[in-house]
Image (cartoon, grey):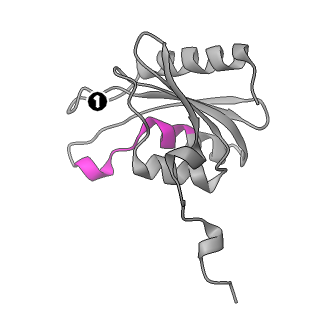
Amino acid sequence: MITQAQRSELVARASEARQNAYAPYSNYRVGAALLAGSGEVYTGVNVENAVYPTGTCAERTAIFKAVSEGERAFKAIAVVTENGGTPCGSCRQMLAEFGLDTLVLIADASGRVVSETNVRALLPQAFGSADLPPRA
């Protein structure tokens, strides 16, 4: 559980990060702010490329930054888009890797939270490490 102040901070940090998005092709700018178990907040933006599959989403950028700093547990993520769009399937799967109960706040460009859910609801029947064969 996170406080209302933490929720507000995450949305504000995601909104601020969104200004740095590199989206020259779609013009769909996304910002994310991820609250780690340590209390640190990691931000991310989408970064597009002329070769579309090589770009990355804001949510994954924030996750990669956090993991590269040693984080493995996440409490919440705020995602801000122009219209309150939800994370893509790849981002949902990446979030699931670190916990199905992670709170997901979806906000629009005005900072209004349009949806509050968790990874489990966004990715029902998620594939995870338990679905892999046992290691020898």
In the displayed structure, 40 sits above or below 69; it is: above
> Percent from the top left, x then y, of residue 68?
64, 47
Secondary structure under badge 1? loop
Question: Going by the image, does 30 lie left or right of 122?
Answer: left
Q: Residue furthest right?
A: 38
> Percent from the top left, x then y, of residue 107?
47, 21
Read off the residue under disc 1. 23
**Residue 60 forms part of the magenta stretch:** yes
Name the image quarter holding residue 12. Answer: top right
In-front residue for pair 45/132: 132
The residue that appears at 43% across and 52% down in the rendered structure is: 90
Q: Residue furthest bottom?
A: 136
Placement of the C terminus among the 4 image quadrants: bottom right
Name the image quarter holding residue 3. Answer: top right
Placement of the N terminus among the 4 image quadrants: top right
> Percent from the top left, x then y, of residue 134?
67, 84
The residue that appears at 47% across and 47% down in the rendered structure is: 91
**Residue 30 forms part of the magenta stretch:** no
The residue range painted magenta reads 52-62
Q: Considering the whole magenta stretch, tell me its main secondary structure.
A: helix
Look at label 1 and name its amino acid: Ala
In-front residue for pair 3/19: 3
